[in-house]
Amino acid sequence: MKFNLNAIVRPNILSLAPYQCARDDFEGEASIYLDANENPYNSGLNRYPDPYQVDLKRQIGQLKGVSTDQIFLGNGSDEAIDLLYRIFCCPGKDNYISISPSYGMYDVCGKVNDIERREALLTTDFNIHIPRIKELWDQYTKLIFLCSPNNPTGNTLKREDIIELCQSFHGIVVVDEAYIDFAKTPSFSEEIAHYPNLVVLQTFSKAWGLAGIRLGMAMAQAEVISLLNKVKYPYNVNVLTQKKALDILMYEADRVKQQIAEIIQEREKLSEALISIEQVEKVYPTEANFILVKIKDANHCYQQLLKDGTVVRNRTKVILCDDCLRITVGTPAENKVFIDQLRIIAP
Ligand SMILES: *Cc1c(COP(=O)(O)O)cnc(C)c1O
């Protein structure tokens, strides 16, 4: 299948001339800036941020083994999800495919943009069923959203399945890797050179411990990234966020790595502790920083945990997740308290 990017971009986006920032006209360092109507008195925040986050992307590029023009940064990876709809899907006409169960934002964003959803139910062991997905797409299908490790199930999707979709689909294959730093499986960012229709999403919100600064990224070939750049708000990542992320990447990467290792270790301990609880019917295998657990009387357990001051995610109403709670791995002390509480609730 020969992929043709321009053929799947919305015509209004293809012909769009992006907003020209003051700093787009000028490159380099000047001694006096009278071009952007900023307050001239230096507060550290009186200037607009770099619209293309060059320093930050250089650092991320080194870490991920991609070039700066293969990276888009946004206000959380949610921004990239929304932009992908707006770039590729004509409201009321085009459609997208997302797996089920998976992350809720694909569908909220799809609805906001008035794009038809085609739902690809996962198998009972939470894998994708390729023939089922191929039956769903038609010429109006522009995006397929995959999530690996998947939220809320925790498993990674099979590598060969994702590759098969990249090779056979005429539109964009999005692989959301919000939890990839907790996984044994390598990232699909390694594959973007091979697949012009592959977009890999990652975020600073989970493993990097920076949910509060709102920073997410999309990695893809430069042609796709330039579309994202064209449609985004000019200054979509603020100065404080850019500085903080750069700081952590440059000076605290080792601490973060250590934390990730500890969280993975705790995850394994927590899984074993959960299995030992009689009411627990299944602890699903996970490569993320959370565990999906099937438990008798899940709603009751959820409510009792709340009364004890512990909030977990109730997934009992989610398709294929009957009687399931999703437990985020906490600190060793938090996990211990949680397990003690659960033992009393569900002996
Ligand atoms: C948490 C999460 C994200 C993160 O979104 P941000 O906007 O970057 O905070 C993305 N995808 C999935 C599947 C998630 O679970």
Image (cartoon, helix red, strand yellow):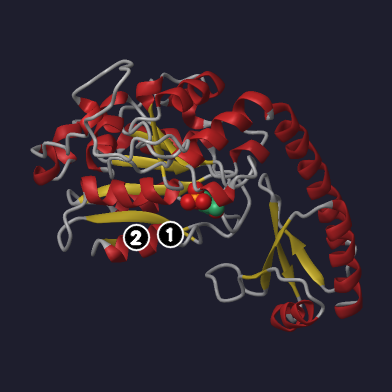
Q: Quadrant of residue 68?
A: top left
Q: Secondary structure at mark 2?
A: helix
In depth, the one of 254 and 201 nearer the eye is 254
Q: Residue 109: give its label.
A: 2
Q: Quadrant of residue 200?
A: top left
Whether residue 121 is visible to the viewer of this picture, yes or no, is yes
The residues bearing labels 1 and 2 have C-alpha atoms spaced at a distance of 6 Å
Residue 315 higher or lower than 211, as above or below: below
Residue 311 higher or lower than 105, as above or below: below
Q: Secondary structure at mark 1?
A: helix
Whether residue 194 is visible to the viewer of this picture, yes or no, is no
Which residue type does callout 1 highlight?
Met
In depth, the one of 102 and 245 nearer the eye is 245
Residue holding disc 1: 105
How would you rate the neighbour count of disc 1 (Cα within 10 Å): few for under 14, some for 14-19, many for 20 or more? few
Q: Quadrant of residue 14?
A: top left
Q: Are marks 1 and 2 in contact (CB under 8 Å)?
A: yes
Which residue type does callout 2 highlight?
Cys
Q: Residue at x 72, y 32 (%)?
A: 257
What is the x, y in percent for residue 144?
35, 48
